[in-house]
Amino acid sequence: MIKLLIMCGTGVATSTIVTGKVKLWLKEKGLDKEVTLYQSKIADEIRRVDNYDVIISTTIVPNSIKDKVIMGIPLLTGMGVDDMFLEVEKRILESKNASKF
């Protein structure tokens, strides 16, 4: 099972909006049975990023974890949504393939 974390500054407002949109997208893609969603705030997850296969954030993240995080701002602004979801799908597929070995 792929672990996907959605995080924001407080773990409440923007991460809730993004979680709803990601759930819908996963269902449309037929990936909803393969991905477990987690929602939290960055302060709680900063030291646990390695516990997740994919991370979407709506807040600024430290440079030390930037390469692990996909910015979820497009889901709030409506600009760049397709590109963002392409990156999410790519990372989900990479994680699925890595777990086969």
Image: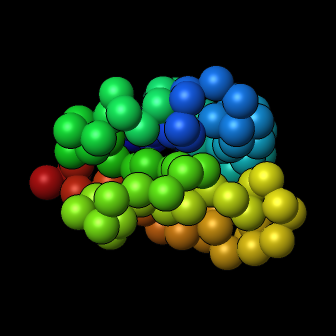
Residue 21 visible in the shown view: yes
Residue 91's image quarter?
bottom left
Q: Tell me which residue sits at (42%, 38%) in the image.
A: 42
Q: Tell me which residue sits at (82%, 71%) in the image.
A: 79
| The N terminus, quarter of image | top left
| The C terminus, quarter of image | bottom left
The residue nearer to you, when weighing 91 against 72, is: 72
Tell me the colour scheme of the image.
Answer: rainbow
Position in image of residue 65 (x %, y %): 28, 59
The residue sitting at the left extreme is 101
Q: Is residue 95 above or below residue 46?
A: below
Position in image of residue 18 (x %, y %): 70, 41
Q: Is residue 75 above or below residue 84?
A: above
Q: Tell me which residue sits at (83%, 61%) in the image.
A: 77
Judge from the rendering whether residue 28 lies leftward or rightward of residue 49; answer left or right.
Answer: right
The residue sitting at the right extreme is 78
Residue 68 visible in the shown view: no
Position in image of residue 3 (x %, y %): 39, 36
The residue nearer to you, when weighing 78 against 14, is: 14
Q: Is residue 8 above or below residue 91?
A: above
Total label count?
Answer: 0
Residue 87's image quarter?
bottom right
Judge from the rendering whether residue 25 lies leftward or rightward of residue 9; answer left or right.
Answer: right
Residue 24's image quarter?
top right
Position in image of residue 62 (x %, y %): 33, 59
